[in-house]
Amino acid sequence: MKDGRLFEAFVNRHDEDAWQRVLAELESHIHEVDRVATRIWFHFFPLSLAQALQEAEDPQALARELFLDGTYRLVDQIDSSHRFLYGHRYWPEVKRAVIEYAQSPRASQTLDLAGHVREVAAQVAERRRLEPSLVMGITAVAFMTLQQVGWEAFESTPGTIALDPRIAARTPEEVLAHRARDDRQGFFSWWKYPDKVWTITFDENDPEATFRLINRQHLTTAAAQDKRPHHLRDPRCVPNEGPIPVQCRSGSCGSCWVGVLGGAEKLSEMEDYERHRLREFGYLETDEPKPIIRLACQARAFGAVSIVIPPWNGIFGRFLRKWKQQRSMELTGTL
């Protein structure tokens, strides 16, 4: 067995663009239940931001400059950051398999990172008698986690999960069916609600993690009707304002960004203002009309939707663009 730090060094050679190519190559190999979730996770934990913080002389000062709020360090949530992936239930085996693989001779036989991911996923699938597609996404997440937190931190965590056995027993098909299902409107419901009412799920692993939305409402407006003490779970939440962190409701703070696990097609199309703000925050750059990352204060719903709330927020898009440009110039010797 060899030191896993050698494999860590190989993984560290891949920048964000390289990882995008890896994800594009792996996408068709990831089960539908985790195809979008995997992409969301990589948006939640961008490699370039992690690298910028690691290279900063004073990471805490940089975090304050970028208004980073919440649990933004992946090293503080190695075993839990991916809880919204179906593959999270296989995390103990995946993490153990990555550690074993990194210390084996196989780790040095190819420079194809996507190939390494597929091989580890295949090993876990064989041991658990699963379809490899069910662990492909979480395996890619494990590799990126290793790159961002380092070998020692990755190896040292217990690799545990915390899922209710009833939740863990759900099949991929049941999860997908739940995401696609819309609420039935009672025959006399129009007496109380002239418009249709939909269920918004904000944590698929908690049966109580839902709120009701009147057709065409913004996600944050509907969430504010949920008066439970969500600020005790997430200090970023404002008391009596619901489970989605929100400060401004005008798209200027960025605290209400969410990932859309299911039902993206049931949200309003993204307008230019939201698109511009997502880019400025650093969360997403896309021309898609209904992308998987949204500002909840700008997105209206026309059906049941399943979202995931990231554990942090910030304003770092402009900084990262300058940082990437400077880093590229340094690497090419043009600075």
Image: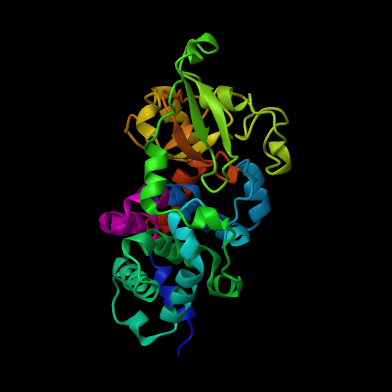
Image quadrant assignment for residue 21: bottom left
What stretch of residues is rendered in magenta? 15-38
Looking at the image, which residue is at 62% across and 24% down?
Answer: 248
Percent coordinates x, y for residue 127 in the rendering: 38, 76
Counting from the top left corner in percent of width and height, residue 165 is at 55, 58
> Seen in the image, is 144 located left or right of residue 313?
left
Residue reaching furthest to the bottom: 1
Say whether residue 67 is magenta.
no
Which residue corresponds to the image point at 40% horizontal and 27% vertical from the top-left? 267
Q: Position of residue 315 (x, y in %)?
A: 56, 38
Reply above or below: 205 against 284: below
Q: Is residue 24 magenta?
A: yes
**Residue at image coords 59%, 62%:** 75
Answer yes or no: is residue 285 visible.
no
Q: Is 310 or 19 nearer to us in this picture?
A: 310
| Front-most of residues 11 and 269 | 269
